[in-house]
Amino acid sequence: MTFNEHLPALQVIVPLLSAPIVILLTPRGLAWAAAAASTLFSLFIAIALAMTTVTGTALTYDLGGWEAPYGITLSIDAFSSLLLLIVTGAGAVAIIAGKASIDVQIETHRQPLFYSAWLLALAGLIGMVISADAFNIFVFMEISSLASYILIAGGPDRRALPATFKYLITGTIGATFYLIGVGLIYMLTGTLNLADMEARISEVTSLNPLLAAAGFITIGLALKAAVFPLHVWLPNAYTHAPHMVTAFLAACGTKVAIYVLLRFNFFVFQANLPEHAVQFAFFLMPLALLGTVIASAVAMFEGHLKRLLAFSSVAQMGYVLIGASLLNASGLMASVIHLFNHAMAKAALFLAVASLAIRFRDLRVDELAGAARTMPWTCAAFVVGGLSLVGIPGTAGFISKWLLILSVMDHGHFGILLVAIIVLTSLMAVYYVWRVVEKLYFAAPRLSNVRVNEAPLTLLVATWIVALGNVAFGLYPELPLTLASHAAETLMEHPR
Amino acid sequence: MISLFGIFLLTLLVIVAIAIVHTRNLFAAVMLTSIFSLLMAANFFILDAADVALTEAAVGAGVTMVIFLSALALTAEREKRRTYTRSAGLIVVGVTAITLIYATFDKPPLGDPDAPVHQHVAPYYIEKTPEFMGFPNVVTAVLASFRGYDTLGEVFVVFTACIGVLFILDARRGVGSMYGRRGRGLHHHHIPQNVGRLLVPLIVLFGLYVQFHGEYSAGGGFQAGAIIATGIILYGLIEGENAALAAIPRPALLFLMVGGASLYGLVGVVCMLLGGHFLDYSVLAENPVTGRQIGVIAIELGVGMTVCGALLSIFHAFAARKHS
Amino acid sequence: MTLIEILGHFNYWVFAILLMVGFYAVIVKHNLIKKLIGLSIFQSAVFLMYITMDKVEGGTAPIIQPDLPDQIYSNPLPQVLILTAIVVGVSTLALGLSLIVRINERYGTIEEDEILEAD
């Protein structure tokens, strides 16, 4: 077999197998270098895979040489490729740029373990994205979850510990619910392979366990994805995690769970459960709407910058679900591309936050007054990320919101209500972003902050690369758009 | 007859579970949890799951209890009396229960050989294992080969948990409260000490048997790793941590864990280099069956090393922590 | 429903009851160790569900006996899955307990409401 044919397997085993090696690299900086090299290599593999899937082809890889459904298969289509770009991109940028920030927050002798956990979180998320086997998704979900708990518990504040514990309990309940659902489906079909499940579920006559399975899987994954009102673990976890961990996980952690949720619901259930589409939309749409409105409102009055952005993440995931619950190709395309664009915006914002945090000990918005005078570049990057989050034309965020509004318009009177809510929550986003920008630029600096200077160069450069990425994908959105439209097609082509 | 015994065990399980939740004495709750695991293991055995029963007994009743106890030694032994706001919790629990019971009325009955779960993939494994693998334990065949990638993931779950405990507890040298005064173990308790000394070599020997006989009877890397780890933990408890760490020092545990995980991965990579898929052991030798056997033995060894090393590291990390 | 059918469903009902008992402890209890114990009961219940479905009437553990060609074997796949899940469960427990130990050191308590009050 050629090297290229092994790419799907290499995508996950490169970060996975470098994790044990990294903990042995105790000399200063070596663990970081190895972890950075490994994540960068994963990013290159993800780009190479995207070059193939952008044409609409899907790749599969039979692990152990056993074909589905007897063995475990990896499968990569346009949708998974987009997610791989998000996950590996966020993982690579945050670790490469974040050395200065991590050096401040994690003691040197604990760093090899920290970087090892970083690689495991990355490998777990990748494994969830590319696996075509329901149980294998559970295994890699647990790798990524356990590793995320470790990363979040590394936060220097003591409040990181109860936040992590809450996340651990919620995450395990979510994973166990997912396991119950998979078990029920396995009981009815005798298979664990997703495509095979889809084919065999249509022959199942007893619908009760199937409905229960759909419920358990959806709720379990919604817990992991912090879908409103199951988001309560998220704000504290993101607030008290080390800043670089927040940048990494905010960009991709919950999105992978949403991805699995969409794949399960559209591939496995949609085709086979009568009324499933209607029920899916009926349950998800109100939650998505409530989630965006309430979380945006909380963000408007939140005083801590990281927590503000965390609530904004809950609100933004609402848009993704609104698009998905429209149940048509254009809505799905809007939600898939919003996964990508929101990851870009949040990565830029949280990288800017990490830069600010190196100079300011306290991240409450009031404490950051006048930061733009001493850290102009960081604050300018924050503004670019904020514009993309709001959805100003010329940024990536605009593309997805525009597509979402276009798609919603098709829904008559109800569509007008949805447009109103989307516009309203966007205005709320304008308000909470503006509140921060106003403090950064127009408030008088506190006396204690006069002597701060600009963030370290590597961090600044990385922040700007991501910020400019927001502009670039706003002006030239072809690659994510093509991937998203292929993704929407594959999700919709499973007949009802 | 056996199903009556099963019903008896299941009823006991429910009673023990309720007792665990009800008691305020955390020490008692942990002990009951261990009993719960043993009952569960017995129940698994009745349901023809010998490998799982062995694992549940070694991991659930053995290792989990020791880790719980070492955590209790560092925290509190009693739960505080509280008035709870139960309503929200009860509603969530109630809805879950109703969903589940709603689902069970439509399930295929227990043991029905025509149930879909026994039709599709499972018969293939049972039929093909002797032909493809040349050994009789189907569970080992599925675990190590057909679904070897899952098992790789599982090894890394244990690995992750271990580095997590080391990271969070920031484990460094030192002797903590678990080992009695000055880490000398149970030197003044003669009966447990002498019985324990007798048991330790037997436990380790049994662990090695389980490790290398997993293709032919119930057992394999997980069970062996857990059993050997329990044996060494027992040694540490009776002889003191210093003796346990002298037998297997901490860096050695780390290397055992890293070596095991790397060995598993390396086998997969070698398969790729020899022209097969990742973890396709058939390319490891001229004869595919021999190749698979070599692969299965190698990765089971990796599993055993990682599990043993990780569990012992976790235990030492707790034990070395001083009571605050 | 006949008696035999009720007995056949007994395993599933015990699974549902254990699941509820564990879930109740996780949600309602304030003591963090109790929450973790509840979590482990909750997970064990799911193990029971999987292992229950592997049973075949008249079957035996899936270790092939070549001299008994007509032997029926129980389903090996749920067993493999649960072997994995047990190890995942103990990993989660270990990590959770290490967090509890640290919480106790930093807060001086392992009761959730007291921790919330402390911040």
Image (cartoon, helix red, strand yellow):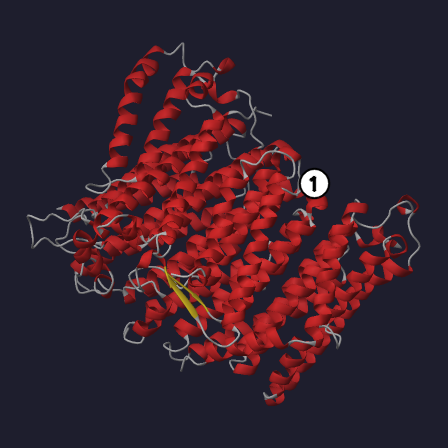
Please tell me which residue lies in front, A202 or B16.
A202
In-image side of C93 versus A88 (left or right): left
Circle 1 packing at 10 Å, graded few (<14), some (14-19), many (20+), is few
Spot occupied by residue B220 in the image (x, y as percentages of width and height): 28, 40
Residue that badge 1 annotates: A103
Please tell me which residue lies in front, C1 or B70.
B70
Spot occupied by residue B5 in the image (x, y as percentages of width and height): 18, 44
Spot occupied by residue B85 in the image (x, y as percentages of width and height): 55, 50
Residue at x-position 12% and y-position 53% = C58
Please tell me which residue lies in front, B223 or B237.
B223
Q: Where's the C terminus of chain B, which quadrant?
A: top right
Whether residue A360 is visible here, answered yes or no, is: no
Q: Is B229 situated above or below C22?
A: above
Quarter of the rendering containing residue A67 = bottom left
Residue at x-position 60% and y-position 68% = A339
Subunit of label 1: A
Q: Is A215 situated above or below A180?
A: below
Please tell me which residue lies in front, A154 or B192.
A154
Q: Is A186 situated above or below A421?
A: above
Whether residue A339 is visible here, answered yes or no, is: yes
In-image side of A413 versus B212 (left or right): right
In-image side of B114 versus B241 (left or right): left
Residue type at the position of mark 1? Asp
Spot occupied by residue A65 in the image (x, y as percentages of width and height): 32, 59
Q: How many marks?
A: 1
Quarter of the rendering containing residue B40 = top left
Quarter of the rendering containing residue A89 = bottom right
Residue at x-position 47% and y-position 76% = A491
Q: Secondary structure at mark 1?
A: helix
